[in-house]
Image (tube, grey):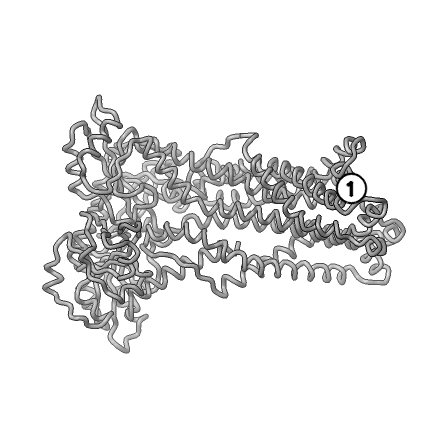
């Protein structure tokens, strides 16, 4: 959980730092509605005419890819004119030189970027590939975005990045002594309603698009918090079970239940708080690989490279969450301990060790019912592509209930499995048979230890099935998008929409002239406000109807007449249905559009709008294509067309892929994007190791007298160690199998929730063999975790142990 908070904080801090560095002393900036070229150039004069404005600095601000002998880098590409001197100070800028800049001239870069890429570096724009060998090196640029920045003259940047006559932002420097709040109000009144006036340190809207994985990470963090609560319940139950006589004596001496509860609760909260501190210490380094994956996404959307950042706000959340979670989880065990029968406990302590069969059966029925209820709620949450606002919270709560209840059921089921093995153990000798009989004699310990293993195995099993299923579903959906066409692009397809290193108009023109080409279809992507919220707006020439139609009509004809199609998340957010109208804010003002249908579009987790290319251009101006899809002519295969395009040598570094190669590349990209989840999955196995280690150490202390008796009757130190290892192995096997069983219903719940957390309605596939390698891995981890308790047991002092009571 701490890793997720650190990741979110790191993104916020990194983007804010770059925003402040770009703004310099200017407190305000003006931006348009769209993410790319959203301001008309005429807006600069209107800003300068507002009373209290000392200077207005027009800027092109985008993301481009640089490449050299030492690798690739996403850089923040800027276009400025001589008005930038009002921010950075005078450096001899010549307006005539700015105006005379020609396409293809090298921008100014930082020495850091040259060192990072090497001497033969290039920068790709929407027009061409620019060599950086003759680029001017400016030392101050090394302090901006960790040196990953390139600065063009403004007119050149507008041509290179398809923004002729348009800008991305205007930074506003007020007259000294001007009230910034009042100036902001005057600017808002003077500018068209589609333009916004923001504080200069506010992150760009595109930064949110780069963090789409964080809600899913947060969901998994909540699942991990539920598992942690179950482990706390286990430990507290085991501890209080061994302190029954102490509690009985305290009760006989007149201690009130409130005193007993408050003492045990304080102890649990303290342990949870200390565990939360440990979680923060472990979470910060664990966040590093997660931040690495998220940073790639944020850089693609904003050019900002995220660095690890922690603060007091991210540090205190861990201990507080740990303390609250531990207190809530421990309450049931504490209340049960206060109901001890004083007389019977003082006379026959072992009577209470045997669980009440009827009560255990009732508990199991309740837990299985809760699991079923949770899965049912999750299925309801994902039904009909979750187009209603109530469905996501119901689905998330259902998943959490199903995970917690199914894992809690392992505490009840594990002793039953052990008891079923007792007849076999009675006819056998050796450490395994003895360990089974000891576990059967202490059913509560067996259930608690097995649950410590079942949680991480179930967690791993859910991820192992869910993430590949989401990936496969995404690949199948885009198989219909590509529709047998050849993919041609300067970039990977996934999450590169904000990257202004697109295929140039010349490439598209030359593609259309090649033999064997039936058409060259461009896909465009932009983000803009729809009903007040940032939304992805896409368009494609000859776009196939690729996704499942949930409601209404989805045809090329409805797009050509000016209607739009929307994804389920956008329908949910705007409460829209087929026939509804939505307000899209373009660079020329708001426009009402009619929704022709809702379909299962997975883009931006279902929060996307699709329209025709002419419609998009009329709202946002001409945009560079995100990708080109080249359809082969009749009688020409995709493989033959790829060979023709490759042989034409249209541009260095151009990707030309058959449909199967495109889907394989997309799958690799999605797997790389989902890498943080595998990091968390591996961390869950460490939880299994720590849970087993703490449980076995606690049991070793509580069973000292029992182990001393075994040693006194002739069991060797090596045999005692084998007994401990056998105990752990049995617990590992039972917990692993139960964890795998618990993962099955939770996979179904996760697949249903995938509609609104990942944008794809992945189908549930029952694979009985999937996840067994995690069971084997968990057993190995548990046995390794038992090595230290086994060593301590082998060094047991018999006399001292027999005296212990």
Q: State which quarter of the image contains the C terminus.
A: bottom right
Vertical order, 174 against 644 (above or below): below
Q: Position of residue 398 (x, y in %)?
A: 56, 42
Q: Position of residue 575 (x, y in %)?
A: 40, 44
The local secondary structure at tag 1 comes to helix
Vertical order, 791 against 271 (above or below): above
Q: Position of residue 652 (x, y in %)?
A: 21, 42
**Quadrant housing residue 508:** top left
Query: In the displayed structure, does residue 688 sit left or right of residue 122?
Result: right
Q: Position of residue 801 (x, y in %)?
A: 82, 54
Q: Look at the image and tell me whether residue 562 can be seen.
A: no
Nearer to us in this view, 122 or 667:
122
**Quadrant housing residue 513:** top left
Residue count near mark 1 (Cα–Cα under 10 Å), binned few <14, some 14–19, many ≥20: some
User: Residue furthest toward the right?
Assistant: 347
Q: Look at the image and tell me whether residue 336 can be seen.
A: yes
User: Residue furthest toward the top?
Assistant: 635
Query: In the displayed structure, does residue 576 sit left or right of residue 320?
Result: left
**Quadrant housing residue 191:** bottom left
Residue on which the image places disc 1 = 438
Vertical order, 13 against 69 (above or below): below
Nearer to us in this view, 15 or 445:
445
The tally of labels here is: 1
Nearer to us in this view, 370 or 354:
354
Query: In the displayed structure, does residue 267 sit left or right of residue 344?
Result: left
Query: In the displayed structure, does residue 460 sit left or right of residue 238?
Result: left
Give me the residue at 38% from left, 34% from top: 475
Vertical order, 391 against 287 (above or below): above
């Amino acid at each position: 959980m701490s890793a997720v908070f650190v990741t979110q904080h790191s993104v916020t801090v990194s983007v804010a730092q770059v925003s402040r560095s770009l703004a310099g002393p200017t407190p305000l900036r003006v931006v348009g509605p769209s993410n790319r070229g959203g301001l008309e150039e005429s807006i600069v004069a209107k800003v300068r005419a507002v009373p209290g404005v000392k200077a207005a600095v027009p800027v092109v601000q985008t993301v481009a890819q640089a490449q050299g002998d030492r690798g690739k880098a996403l850089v923040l590409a800027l276009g400025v004119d001589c008005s930038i001197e009002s921010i950075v100070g005078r450096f001899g800028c010549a307006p005539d030189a700015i105006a005379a800049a020609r396409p293809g001239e090298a921008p100014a870069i930082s020495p850091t970027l040259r060192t990072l890429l090497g001497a033969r570096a290039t920068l790709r724009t929407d027009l061409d590939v620019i060599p950086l060998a003759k680029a001017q090196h400016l030392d101050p640029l090394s302090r901006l975005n960790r040196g990953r920045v390139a600065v063009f003259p403004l007119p050149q940047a507008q041509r290179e990045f398809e923004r002729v006559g348009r800008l991305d932002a205007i930074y506003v420097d007020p007259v000294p002594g001007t009230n910034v709040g009042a100036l902001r109000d005057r600017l808002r009144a003077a500018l068209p309603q589609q333009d916004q006036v923001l504080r200069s340190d506010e992150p760009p809207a595109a930064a949110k698009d780069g963090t789409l994985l964080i809600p899913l990470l947060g969901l998994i963090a909540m699942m991990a918090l539920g598992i942690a609560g179950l482990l706390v319940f286990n430990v507290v139950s085991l501890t209080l079970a061994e302190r029954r006589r102490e509690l009985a004596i305290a009760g006989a001496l007149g201690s009130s239940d409130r005193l007993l509860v408050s003492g045990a609760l304080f102890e649990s909260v303290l342990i949870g708080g200390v565990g939360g501190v440990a979680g923060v210490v472990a979470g910060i380094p664990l966040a590093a690989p997660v931040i690495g994956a998220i940073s790639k996404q944020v850089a693609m959307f904003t050019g900002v490279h995220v660095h690890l950042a922690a603060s007091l706000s991210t540090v205190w959340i861990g201990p507080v969450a740990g303390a609250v979670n531990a207190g809530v989880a421990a309450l049931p065990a504490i209340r049960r301990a206060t109901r001890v029968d004083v007389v019977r406990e003082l006379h026959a302590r072992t009577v209470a060790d045997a669980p009440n069969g009827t009560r255990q059966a009732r508990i199991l029925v309740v837990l299985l019912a809760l699991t079923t209820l949770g899965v049912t709620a999750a299925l309801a949450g994902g039904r009909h592509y979750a187009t209603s606002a109530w469905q996501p919270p119901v689905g998330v709560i259902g998943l959490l209930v199903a995970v917690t209840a199914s894992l809690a059921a392992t505490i009840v089921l594990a002793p039953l499995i052990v008891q079923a093995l007792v007849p076999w153990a009675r006819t056998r000798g050796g450490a395994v048979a003895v360990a089974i009989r000891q576990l059967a004699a202490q059913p509560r310990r067996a259930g608690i230890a097995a649950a410590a293993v079942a949680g991480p195995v179930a967690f791993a099993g859910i991820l192992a099935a869910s993430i590949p299923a989401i990936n496969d579903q995404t690949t199948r959906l885009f198989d219909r998008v590509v529709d047998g066409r050849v993919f041609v692009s300067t970039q990977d397809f996934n999450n590169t929409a904000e990257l202004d290193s697109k295929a140039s108009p010349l490439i598209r023109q030359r593609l259309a002239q090649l033999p064997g080409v039936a058409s060259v279809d461009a896909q465009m992507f932009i983000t803009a406000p729809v009903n007040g919220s940032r939304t992805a707006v896409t368009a494609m020439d000859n776009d196939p109807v690729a996704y499942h139609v949930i409601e209404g009509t989805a045809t090329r004809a409805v797009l050509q007449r000016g209607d739009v199609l929307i994804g389920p998340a956008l329908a949910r957010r705007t409460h829209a249905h087929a026939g509804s109208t939505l307000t899209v804010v373009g660079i020329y003002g708001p426009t009402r559009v009619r929704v022709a249908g809702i379909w299962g579009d997975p883009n931006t987790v279902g929060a996307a709008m699709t329209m025709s290319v002419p419609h998009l251009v009329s709202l946002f101006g001409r945009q560079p294509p995100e990708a080109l899809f080249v359809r082969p002519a009749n009688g020409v295969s995709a493989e033959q067309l790829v060979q023709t395009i490759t042989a034409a040598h249209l541009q260095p570094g151009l990707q030309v892929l058959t449909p199967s190669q495109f889907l394989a590349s997309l799958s690799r990209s999605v797997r790389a994007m989902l890498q943080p989840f595998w990091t968390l999955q591996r961390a869950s196995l460490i939880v299994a190791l720590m849970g087993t280690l703490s449980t076995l150490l606690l049991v070793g202390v509580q069973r000292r007298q029992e182990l001393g008796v075994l040693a006194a009757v002739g069991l060797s130190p090596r045999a005692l160690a084998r007994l401990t290892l056998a105990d752990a192995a049995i617990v590992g096997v039972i917990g692993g199998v139960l964890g795998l069983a618990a993962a099955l219903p939770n996979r179904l719940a996760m697949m249903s929730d995938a509609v609104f957390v990942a944008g794809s309605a992945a189908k549930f596939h029952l694979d009985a063999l999937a996840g067994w390698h995690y069971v084997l891995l968990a057993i190995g981890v548990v046995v390794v975790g038992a090595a230290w308790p086994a060593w301590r047991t082998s060094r047991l002092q018999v006399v001292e142990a027999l005296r212990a009571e």
